[in-house]
Image (tube, rainbow, N blue to C red):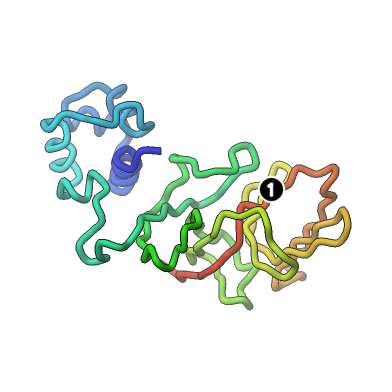
């Protein structure tokens, strides 16, 4: 996935433009914007970069994905998504809602993703609706870990993970409003995306 294309898509969405409207604003065809956002066109002309900067009222550094000065040279961009689906249990450009910057030393070589929380199922664990959690991508987790998982035809959930033989239980902090999710590992579609390592609260 191309950082430049992701930044164009994010900035376009933030100012409420469609791909067609952005294309008209910068004087190119809609297909050009589509190709940029999907990463097919990763080396735009200098003129197009300048026009996009003008359209978004940003600098070249911001548009091209260079780390902002205020987060330091050792920081790394982590994309934040609002959901992960079982059909595509990886980052989808249409679902990217923000970018956060984390110190490289803190990441320790693992791959991470940010997830915007969509419910209050883990409120007692201080993970609330609208917060962003940092998720270390890893299918190996242990009982009691707070994980991001997708199951059956559902989008991602954040729950405590418990496994016993062929059964996985995804538990919330509030069983009254968010009942346990019981899964058969041999029959049910189920993927652990990773472990929640930090809550960044409302960003």
Location of residue 5 with respect to 171 vertically, above or below: above
Q: Secondary structure at mark 1?
A: strand
What residue is shown at x 41% (from left), y 38% (from top)? 1
What residue is shown at x 63% (from left), y 48% (from top)? 155
Location of residue 24 with respect to 13 vertically, above or below: above
Q: Residue 62 vs residue 114: left or right?
A: left
Q: Quadrant of residue 24?
A: top left
Location of residue 8 with respect to 113 vertically, above or below: above
Q: Which of the pair 140/20 is nearer the observer?
A: 140
Give residue 38's position: percent from left, percent from top: 38, 31
Q: Quadrant of residue 72?
A: bottom left
Judging by the rendered image, the residue that carries numbered circle 1 is 191
What residue is shown at x 42% (from left), y 52% (from top)? 79
**Which image quarter is the C terminus in?**
bottom left
What residue is shown at x 29% (from left), y 40% (from top)? 4
Q: Residue 140 vs residue 79: left or right?
A: right
Give residue 118's position: percent from left, percent from top: 56, 59
Q: Which of the pair 102/119 is nearer the observer?
A: 102
Q: Residue 191 vs residue 109: left or right?
A: right
The 10 Å Cα crowd at callout 1, few under 14, some 14 to 19, many 20 or more, is: some
Give residue 198's position: percent from left, percent from top: 51, 70
Q: Residue 48 vs residue 3: left or right?
A: left
């Amino acid at each position: 996935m191309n950082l430049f294309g992701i930044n164009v898509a994010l900035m376009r969405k933030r100012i409420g433009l469609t791909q067609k409207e952005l294309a008209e604003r910068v004087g190119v065809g809609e297909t050009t914007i589509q190709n940029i956002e999907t990463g097919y066109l990763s080396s735009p002309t200098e003129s197009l970069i300048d026009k996009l900067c003008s359209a978004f009222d940003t600098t070249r550094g911001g548009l091209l994905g260079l780390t902002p000065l205020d987060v330091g040279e050792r920081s790394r961009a982590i994309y934040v998504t609002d959901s992960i689906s079982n059909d595509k249990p990886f980052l989808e450009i249409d679902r990217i809602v923000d970018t956060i910057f984390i110190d490289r030393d803190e990441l320790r070589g693992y791959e991470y993703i940010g997830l915007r929380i969509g419910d209050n199922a883990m409120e007692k664990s201080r993970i609330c609706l609208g917060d962003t959690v940092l998720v270390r991508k890893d299918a190996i987790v242990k009982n009691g870990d707070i994980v991001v998982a997708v199951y059956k035809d559902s989008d991602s959930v954040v729950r405590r993970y418990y496994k016993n033989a062929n059964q996985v239980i995804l538990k919330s902090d509030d069983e009254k409003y968010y009942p346990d999710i019981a899964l058969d590992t041999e029959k049910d579609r189920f993927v652990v995306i990773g472990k929640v390592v930090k809550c960044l609260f409302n960003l």
